[in-house]
Image (tube, helix red, strand yellow):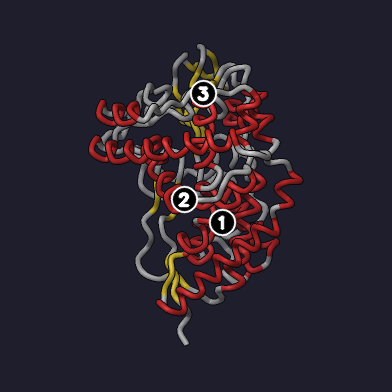
Amino acid sequence: MSGAVAMPSVQPAVLECPYKVVRDPDTVRQVLHRPDDFSPANALLAVTPLSGQALRILQKARFALPPVLASNPGPSHAGIRRVVAGFFTPAKVAAMEPRIHALARDAVAGAGSDLASKGTVDLVQSVAAFPPAIVMMEMLGLPVRDLPQLKAWSLDSLELFWGWPEPVRQVELAHSAAGFYTWLRELVHEAVAAPGVNLFKALAQHGLSVPEVCSLGYFLLIAGQETTTQLISTALFRLLEGSRGMNWEDAASGAKARDFVRHILATESSVPTWRRVAVRDTELKGEPVAAGQEILVELTGNHGFPWAPAGDPPGVGDVPGQPGPTPYGLAFGSGIHRCLGAKLAELEAAVVVEETASALKRVRLHGPAPEWLRLLSFQAPRTVTVAAPPN
C-alpha cells in the first residue's frame, strides 16, 4: 500500500496538538500558495497509524494510494487536474441545476411521506444523502448504483483516514476500505472499457495506470458527494435550530438559501481544516518552520479538536446573527489544489436547502441534540430529525 500511514499523529487520549495550526486567513493562503515550501504530500495520509492487522487487510485487497491529485506535489499534477476539471466546467455545473432541483424534490417528497406516516423523519438520510451521490456519478459519466453501500464506505473511510480509531475499530474500517477499493477497481476496469466519455476512461487515456485511477477515484468518490451531504446536513440543522439569524421559511427563497449556505461554508463547513507538510526549512510570517513539520490550516470556523478546549467558538469572519455575505473564500481551499467541485457543491447545497424548506413547512427539530461527526478535517451532524408541526 502506498501512502497510508507514514506521518505521526495524535491518539484520542493525547491532548497535545501534533501540528502547527494556522488560523489567520492570510497565512493560510500563504501556505496553500507555496506548494514548493508546503507540500500536499500528507493530505491523504491516515491521521492515526494503522495497526499491522489493519494493514494486512488492506494489502490483501491490493489497496494502493499513489499520489495523483490532492496529494500530488509533482509536475504531473497540472495535467491530471485539467482532465478532472473538464468534468466540472462552469457550463456543465450550470446545466445540472434542473437535475439537482428534480432530485431534491423527489427526496423531499419521500421525506414528506415518511413524516406524514411516522411523525418524524431524519433529513440527513432522507434528503441530504443521495442527491449529491447521484449528481456526482452522472457528471463523471459513471453508472449510478450501490449508493447506500457507497455512503457507508465513505463514512468508514473518512474515519479510517481522518479519525482516531482504536485498533479493533481500525480492523472493521480496514475491511470496509478493502471492500470499497475492490468495488472501485472493478468499476475502473468497466469504465475504461465502456463506450462514451467518463472520468476513469479519460484518466486512462491521459496515461494513468489502474492503481493511479483507483487512487484518484477512491477519494474523489468520497469528497465529490459525502462532503456535500455533510454541508447540506449542517445547513439544515442550523436553520432549524434558529441560531444563525435566518428562519426556516426564509430559506425557501433560492437567494436566501444560497446566502445561508455561504454562511455555513464560512463558519463551519464540512471540511474545516486541511494538512500540509514543510518540504524544507523555511519561514511563515517571520517564524521559522522546520522541514518535516506538519501544518494544519484552518479553512473555516474552528470546530474544536481533541486537544482544544470544549466549546464552539465563532468562525473566521462570523458575525453572530448575520448569515449574509460572510467571507467563505477558503472553504474549498486555495491555489493549485483548490477543490474542483466547489461551485457544484455550493449549488447542490443551496438547491436542497431551498427545496426542503419550501416543501416541508413549519417542521421543527425533534428529540435530543444530534451526535456530530467530528474528525480532523470533516464535521457534520449525523442526524437532523424533524417532526411535523402540531395541529
Which residue ends up furthest to the right in the rendered image?
A: 91
**Residue 245 at least partly seen:** yes
Spot occupied by residue 362 in the image (x, y as percentages of width and height)? 53, 76
Disc 1 secondary structure class: helix
Spot occupied by residue 13 in the image (x, y as percentages of width and height)? 25, 36
Using the image as rendered, state which of residue 159 and residue 199 is in the foreground. 199
> Which of the marked residues, 3 or 1, is nearer the chain's N terminus?
3
Mark 3 to mark 1 CA distance (whole Å): 29 Å
Rendered-image quadrant of the N terminus = top left
Q: Residue at x 58, y 63 (%)?
A: 245
| Quadrant of the rendered image containing residue 350 | bottom right
Mark 2 to mark 1 CA distance (whole Å): 13 Å
Disc 2 secondary structure class: loop
Specify whether 12 is left or right of 76. Answer: left
Q: Residue at x 65, y 26 (%)?
A: 205
Mark 3 to mark 2 CA distance (whole Å): 26 Å
Specify whether 57 is left or right of 211. Answer: left
Residue type (three-letter) at the residue carrying disc 2:
Asp
> Which of the marked residues, 2 or 1, is nearer the chain's N terminus?
1
Q: Are marks 3 and 2 in contact (CB under 8 Å)?
A: no
Which residue ends up furthest to the top in the rendered image?
A: 281
Eye-nearest disc, 2 or 1: 2
> Which of the marked residues, 3 or 2, is nearer the chain's N terminus?
3
Mark 1: give few (<14), some (14-19) or many (20+) Cα within 10 Å. Answer: many
Q: Residue 131's mark?
A: 1
Does 158 appear above or below 287? Answer: below
Does 88 appear above or below 135? Answer: above
Q: Residue 146's mark?
A: 2
Residue on which disc 3 sits: 67
Mark 3: give few (<14), some (14-19) or many (20+) Cα within 10 Å. Answer: many
Using the image as rendered, state which of residue 288 and residue 125 is in the foreground. 125
Does 143 appear above or below 252? Answer: above
